[in-house]
Image (cartoon, rainbow, N blue to C red):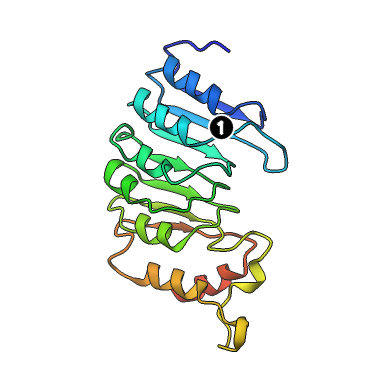
């Protein structure tokens, strides 16, 4: 696959063969790239997308403003460091839906100051450390909260209940307290919650 050096925007939708190797070749060939989207079907076996392609994008595409990598289960602890090392300082929109991120996003908070929208929707299994760290971004205006510390098939066990044995869940309380803290998300004006999640109704009442 050949890419023109002048390409500024490229979008792949539901192509299982697009993986890190293709993204790396694209990044190395297109230094003027502004927008990249790789949207995949989570029901289909797809080529591997991992931290290495993010590292190369950060090194080779300094003008990148929008990045969408939807559905990858192969990111490890380096993804946020690669994004926040200064190479993606122009990034304004980040979509990592259906990509479980297990580490602090603090490097992104510091290294991507222009970021105004982050989408971690769907079965992203968002950890507390992720939510607490991205909450400190001073300019984030739009945030998509996916399933918090649970999968999309386990939504009936996340609402706070009476503290009786294993029926007690603190997940909703943790999220509600995060958004209720005035020191978090100082610029946020739009919050998207999962439509089909028992946590959504609870959070809507508490946060509103």
Rendered image quadrant of residue 168: bottom right
- For the residue pair 129 and 92, the one nearer the viewer reads as 129
Please determine whether, in this image, residue 50 is positioned above or below residue 179.
Answer: above
Left or right, 43 with respect to 187, comes to right
Residue 74 position within the rendered picture, expressed as x and y whole percent measured from the top left: 56, 41
Residue 134: x percent and y percent?
37, 55
Residue occupying the point 67% across, 39% down? 41
Quadrant where the image shows the N terminus? top right
Please give the name of the residue rendered at 66% of the width and 32% of the height, measured from the top-left corner: 14
Report x, y in % for residue 51: 47, 36
Residue 8: in sight, yes or no? no
- Which residue occupies the foreground of this view, 201 or 2? 2
- The secondary element bearing badge 1 is classed as strand
At x 31%, y 33%, the residue is: 90
Is the residue 94 above or below the residue 164 in the image? above
Q: Residue at x 48, y 29 (%)?
A: 36
């Amino acid at each position: 696959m050949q890419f023109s050096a002048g390409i500024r925007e490229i979008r792949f939708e539901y192509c299982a063969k697009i993986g890190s190797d293709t993204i790396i070749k694209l990044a190395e060939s297109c230094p003027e790239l502004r927008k990249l989207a790789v949207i995949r079907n989570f029901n289909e076996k797809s080529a591997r997308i991992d931290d290495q392609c993010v590292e190369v994008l950060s090194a080779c595409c300094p003008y990148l403003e929008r990045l969408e990598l939807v559905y990858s289960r192969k990111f490890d602890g380096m993804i946020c460091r690669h994004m926040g090392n200064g190479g993606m300082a122009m990034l304004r929109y980040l979509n990592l839906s259906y990509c479980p991120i297990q580490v602090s996003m603090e490097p992104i908070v510091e290294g991507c100051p222009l970021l105004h929208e982050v989408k971690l929707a769907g079965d992203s299994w968002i950890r507390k450390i992720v939510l607490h760290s991205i909450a400190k971004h001073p300019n984030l205006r739009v945030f998509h909260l996916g399933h918090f510390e649970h999968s999309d098939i386990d939504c009936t066990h996340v609402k706070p209940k009476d503290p009786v044995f294993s029926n007690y869940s603190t997940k909703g309380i943790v999220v509600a307290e995060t958004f209720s803290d005035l020191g978090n998300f100082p610029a946020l004006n739009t919050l998207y919650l999962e439509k089909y999640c028992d946590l959504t109704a609870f959070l809507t009442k508490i946060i509103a």
